[in-house]
Image (spheres, rainbow, N blue to C red):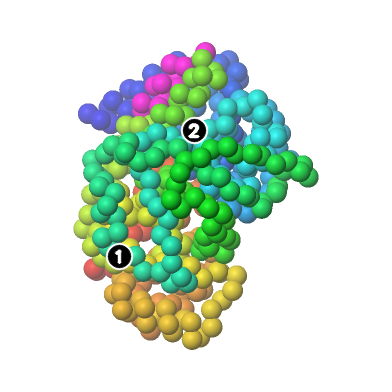
Amino acid sequence: MLYGLRVGLLSAAVLLSSPALAEQGPGVVASIKPVHSLVAAVMEGVGTPHLIIEGGGSPHTYSLKPSDARALEQAEAVFWIGRDIETFLVRPIDELAPQAQHVALQEVEDLVRLEFREGGPFEAHAHGDHEHHDHDHAGHDHAGHDHDSSHSHDHDHDHSHGHDHSHDHDHDHGHAHESDHQHEHGDGHAHGHGAFDGHYWLDPVNAQHFVRRIAEVLIDVDPDHAEIYRQNAAATELRLSELTEEMAAMLAPVADRPFIVFHDAYQYLEARFDLNTVGSITVSPERAPGAGRIAEIRNRIDELGAVCIFAEPQFEPRLVNLLVEETAARSGVLDPLGSDLGDGPDLYFDLMRGNAEALRNCLQENS
């Protein structure tokens, strides 16, 4: 029944579109591949958004290409997670796209919001860490969280084509952790942040909230295609609901199996599906640890009883391979961005399903 409804909604969207209309679609820019995928799904039949960070590029260190600058100059809407993830975009958005609607999806209402987990080069995460978020896996309401998560801090990344522009953010949200604090990610690049982990898209329920906001903005900037956007958004939300149920069924048999990630980017995925992550390796991939450090981490892996250690496609897997030697742990790969996946409306679903399959395959007892 759900599948039939989805097909019907998609068919209605296609019937409402035409080549003539498609040529008149608005100029839309999306920052990273998961965001681009959701925007593309809502725009299907009208136009295609411009993707800034292609392939395995890092949102923490990316530099704009001339084609990106042109797309921003012509944009009517720019969708990004926000200044806590795509630090390189803060100035270019203001300077190159002052006329566009700037949509920081981290500010969408009712998102699940999880605070950063701070720690040293190897940090352990207690399995009960998520309990205080009181999440309901059937699609809960987190309206009690402070939903405006822009933060006041300085950005030292300047990729805005030589402009010396200082953007003054006058938001004061009273977060207890509001500061110029630097968090060292597993990609080796420290960046400023406020109270919350910015990898919101790795919870498919958050993605549903994104889709609603994306549709609202597209209808505002392009009312001629409002009905197509509504139909596409409804179909995409339904797909996300089905995806959440599929992933829950896939991960439930391995939910209690302890594992370690290379880069602490997955707590939204972990919280949604009640997974048992016990730590992350936060050493920089550019600075290989010595034999003593590797032995120390191996001992910690054994102490935590980790079944798997997950690398990422953006990083050299050699370190993870070294760590699993002489331990009972296996290795796997998780990807927060869809680095090796083709762009488009299906990427988000392929990304999330692929991560669920990687977790299940590595964590299951007979693997």
Left or right: 226 in relation to 127: right
Which image quarter holds the C terminus? bottom left
Stretch in magenta: 224-235
Amino acid at circle 2? Val
User: Where 123 falls versus 46 (above or below)?
Assistant: below
Circle 2 Cα neighbour tier, 10 Å, few/some/many (<14 / 14–19 / ≥20): many
Amino acid at circle 1? Ala
Expressed as whole percent of the image width and height from the top left, the position of residue 26 reads: 59, 23
Circle 1 Cα neighbour tier, 10 Å, few/some/many (<14 / 14–19 / ≥20): few
- Identify the residue at the far top of this view: 224
Expressed as whole percent of the image width and height from the top left, the position of residue 94 reads: 66, 35
Left or right: 116 in relation to 244: right
Expressed as whole percent of the image width and height from the top left, the position of residue 305 reads: 29, 75
Which image quarter holds the N terminus? top left
Observer able to see residue 319 = yes
Of tags 2 and 1, the one toward the viewer is 1
Residue tagged 2: 39
Q: Is residue 111 magenta?
A: no
Of 245 and 63, the residue lying toward us: 63
**Label number found at residue 126:** 1
Observer able to see residue 58 = no
Point 59% across, 39% down: residue: 169
- Quarter of the image where one finds residue 145: top left
Point 44% across, 47% down: residue: 175
Name the element at disc 1. loop
Magenta stretch secondary structure, dominant: helix
- Quarter of the image where one finds residue 203: top left
Q: CA distance from mark 2 to mark 1?
A: 35 Å
- Identify the residue at the far bottom of this view: 292
Query: Which of disc 1 and disc 2 is earlier in sequence?
Result: 2
